[in-house]
Image (tube, coloured by chain):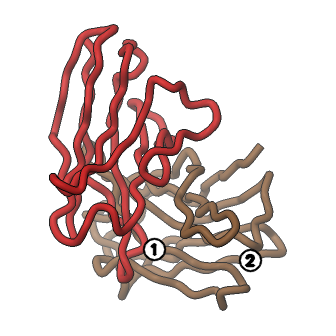
Amino acid sequence: DVQLVESGGGVVQPGGSLKLSCAASGFTFSGSAMHWVRQSSGKGLEWLGRIRSKANSYATHYAASVRDRFTISRDDSMKMVYLHMNSLKTEDTAVYYCTRHYTYYYSVGYIDVWGKGTTVTVSS
Amino acid sequence: FVLTQPHSVSESPGKTVTISCTRSSGSIATNYVQWYQQRPGSAPIIVIYEDNQRPSGVPDRFSGSIDSSSNSASLTISGLKTDDEADYYCQSYDSYNPVIFGGGTKLTVL
């Protein structure tokens, strides 16, 4: 079964940093683009960014709201994707989800699988 | 562009409900639309991909469509069950933004 498991969430002070991890299993991780999405309590889904596969030069793309503070990386040998968050603000408090971008043949693809999420609280 | 969904909809068990997702600019037909269901306390799951395709395991009570005249996508759920009560999000993309979510619709089955 395709599975994504996030970890690394916790409480951090404003201005601090945190690194979230996502362990993937059950699919060809190296060939898949991966996204991070977050959701503040009682709010909607907010896309944060994407990292593509090695075949696409590990290209990254970020939402404007986090572009200068968040970075996505991956380790294909470990089947892991990471979200590095710097200069955290109270408004970054949210559940953070790791998701897989599924493609087939020459399709554009779509997000099909989500992890259960990890909670980040930014508070003094 | 922005995807606009109604904040909430409600319907009775056994009935049919349709949730709309209106694209603010550009044609709804240009880029595929996905729909996600999120039950309270759980991660989202995909229920419709590429406008009208249903993943395996999703009941055929769920269907998707697009309407160019209203520039919107729709998720229709027939034979409503109390278990369908959840938040539903539409999602699309464009050349500059790989993922754009609608604001979400809370479905109440009462």
The answer to whether residue A124 is above or below residue B20 is: below
Numbered circle sitting on residue A75: 2
Query: Which of the 4 quarters of the picture holds residue B14?
Result: top left
Query: Which of the 4 quarters of the picture holds residue A83?
Result: bottom right
Q: Where residue A87 sits in the image (x, y, percent)? A: 36, 80
Q: CA distance from mark 1 to mark 2?
A: 16 Å
Q: Residue at x 56, y 31 (%)?
A: B58
Image colour assigned to chain A: brown
**Amino acid under disc 2:** Asp
Numbered circle sitting on residue A49: 1
Disc 1 crowd rating (10 Å Cα; few below 14, some 14-19, many 20+) is many
Disc 2 crowd rating (10 Å Cα; few below 14, some 14-19, many 20+) is few
Q: Where residue B66 sits in the image (x, y, percent)? A: 31, 49
**Amino acid under disc 1:** Gly
Q: Where residue B63 sits in the image (x, y, percent)? A: 42, 34
Q: Which chain is the one coloured red?
A: B
Badge 1: chain ID: A
Q: Secondary structure at mark 1?
A: strand
The answer to whether residue A31 is above or below residue B80 is: below
Q: Secondary structure at mark 2?
A: strand
Q: Which label's residue is closer to the chain start, 1 or 2?
A: 1
User: Is residue B103 at all visible to an observer of this figure?
Assistant: no
Q: Spot the residue most to the bottom.
A: A57
Q: Residue at x 36, y 82 (%)?
A: B96
The answer to whether residue A14 is above or below residue B101 is: below
Q: Nearer the viewer, residue A15 or A95?
A: A95
Residues at discs 1 and 2 both on one chain: yes
User: Is residue A49 at all visible to an observer of this figure?
Assistant: yes
Q: Residue at x 51, y 41 (%)?
A: B45
